[in-house]
Image (spheres, helix red, strand yellow):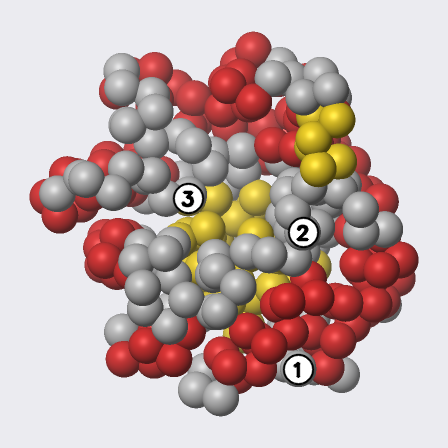
Amino acid sequence: MEKVILLDGAMGTYGKIKGIDYPKIPYMAIENRELLINIHREYLRAGSEIITTNSFRLNPFVIENKEELKGLIEATIDCAKEAIKKEGRGKIAYDIGPLGIKKNSESEIKEGYGLIKSFIESSNDIDYILIETQYLLEESLIALEVFKDINKPLWISYTFDENGNLYSGESIEDLERYINKKDVCGLGINCSKGPKEAKEFIKRIRRFWKSDIIAKPNLGIPTMEEGNPKYNITKEEFRKYMEDLIKEGVTIIGGCCGTTPEYIGELKNLIR
């Protein structure tokens, strides 16, 4: 088996389990610092080799005050660093989510990602850049253009509909024309419709992408119980689906919405 790198699992849904409401998740590094550090430590103890920062929504369209945004980004990186220090192992991938507003102009998108870059490019604590949950092709390409010269290994993962299309209409196969292997070290999927559906998507990516492939799926579409999402895929089922993805060529694995350290522990048992 080719070396498989193990990432972590969900932050938002796991933070919710820990009692943090979703609107407060981006502020955890300051408002719930020890809890965030402990979540990172749980994933490291479960087997994660690389943890992702709690920065998915840390962008100027969510946090409009630039100084507040800068402070949150720095604190978020520091929490991941502290967790690694306490556990004595691990690396950090800085997590960058979509800006999330389709009506933004190209210049606004570029400025938004550029501001994030200006806050993280001098950090010696970041080992990788993960641009994730991209669902609009144009925005993702702007993000890649902004971050391609940051001098860190750059990964990008997309979320697709049930047909393997981005929400801007392009197919998985269309990515071959746009993703430059000289700039991107890893390409793949996260979130989407779940680990079972990911298998066909990975097959399609493998046809044209010969570098690292990322799979960080969620646990499918949840049902709501008392205002909280409930996922029905067990950790054992998740492990089996992920084993199938590894057989299809995935080399970077982890979990998205609904996954917890227990799910990551199953993946550790799978690849060790």
Q: In the image, what residue occupies the spot 34% across and 25% down?
A: 62
Spot the residue most to the top: 31
Location of mark 2 (residue): 220
Distance from disc 3 to disc 2, alpha carbons, whole Å, reads 22 Å
Location of mark 3 (residue): 96
Nearer the viewer's eye, disc 3 or disc 2? 2
Residues 126 and 56: in front is 56
* Residue type (three-letter) at the residue carrying disc 2: Gly
* Residue type (three-letter) at the residue carrying disc 1: Glu
Distance from disc 1 to disc 3, alpha carbons, whole Å, reads 26 Å
Quadrant where the C terminus is found in the figure: bottom right
Q: Is residue 227 above or below residue 44?
A: above
Nearer the viewer's eye, disc 1 or disc 3? 1
Q: Secondary structure at mark 1?
A: loop
Number of numbered callouts drawn: 3
Location of mark 1 (residue): 248
Q: Secondary structure at mark 3?
A: strand
Q: Secondary structure at mark 2?
A: loop
